[in-house]
Image (cartoon, rainbow, N blue to C red):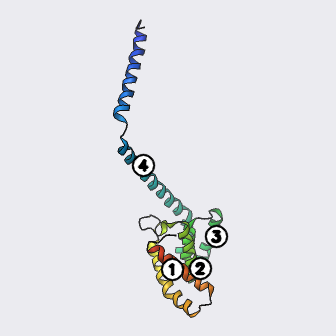
Amino acid sequence: MLQDWFDRLIWLGLGATLAALAALVLLGAPSGSDARHLSALDKGMEQEIAYQARVSFLQKLYGPVQALQDGGETQRALLKLQELERSYPGEAHGYLLKGAILKQQGVLEEAVGNYVHGVRLNGDYIDEASPLSRRTEIRQLVDEGLTTLGPRARRNPDNPTLAAALKNVYYLQSRLAGGCE
């Protein structure tokens, strides 16, 4: 079996491989709690990377809309949002931007409806810890909605549009307070 130097070299390599494999199995494998800890770290890192990628994507996608809004070109911003909504249906960020523009234009009932739609699609806009958080903006909208829409709805109890808008304000208020769907 060990007749020449080549056979000895192969057996030596096989022995070293088996020793390394045994050491890896016995010493290198993390224990149960260590494996769970590493798995949790990996999962947390994956979530953070996903959040950063999402924020970057939304900034790139909706940057032109934000620039138009900041420049006072709200009608063009709304048209751009409609175009983006056709390309990315169900994207919550567009609804929040549309709500902000409508609030700026004084169309509070529609603004509240858009904010509600966006928050229902993605609750991260309410979460303070989220990089997408618009909590302060939504709180201001709720305060304005309660002071403006509340009295109007009480004066006109037969108006279904005002009743729906006030219901949306209450929904946002409950989400800010920690309520869920």
- Sequence-wise, the earlier of marks 1 and 4 is 4
Secondary structure category for the residue under label 4: helix
* Image point (37%, 22%), residue name: 16
Alpha-carbon span between mark 2 and mark 3: 15 Å
User: Reading the chain from its start, which is encountered first: label 1 or label 3?
Assistant: 3
Residue type indicated by callout 1: Tyr
Q: Is residue 14 above or below residue 42?
A: above
Precedes in sequence: disc 2 or disc 3: 3
Compared to residue 80, the image places residue 54 above or below, namely above
Q: Position of residue 141 (x, y in %)?
A: 49, 79
Question: Pointer 3: what residue?
Answer: 82
Q: Residues within 10 Å of mark 3 (few under 14, many from 20)?
A: some
Question: What is the secondary structure assignment of the residue under circle 1?
Answer: helix
Quadrant in the rendering for residue 29: top left
CB of mark 4 within 8 Å of CB of mark 2? no
Tag shown at residue 170: 1
Quadrant in which the N terminus is drawn = top left
Disc 4 residue type (three-letter): Asp
Decide: few, some or many residues near mark 2? Use Cα within 10 Å; few <14, some 14-19, many ≥20: some
Residue type pointed to by label 3: Gln
Please name the residue shown 33% across and 33% down the image: 27
The mark nearer the N terminus, 4 or 2, is 4
Q: Which residue is under mark 4?
A: 42
Question: Alpha carbon of mark 1 to alpha carbon of mark 4: how far?
Answer: 38 Å
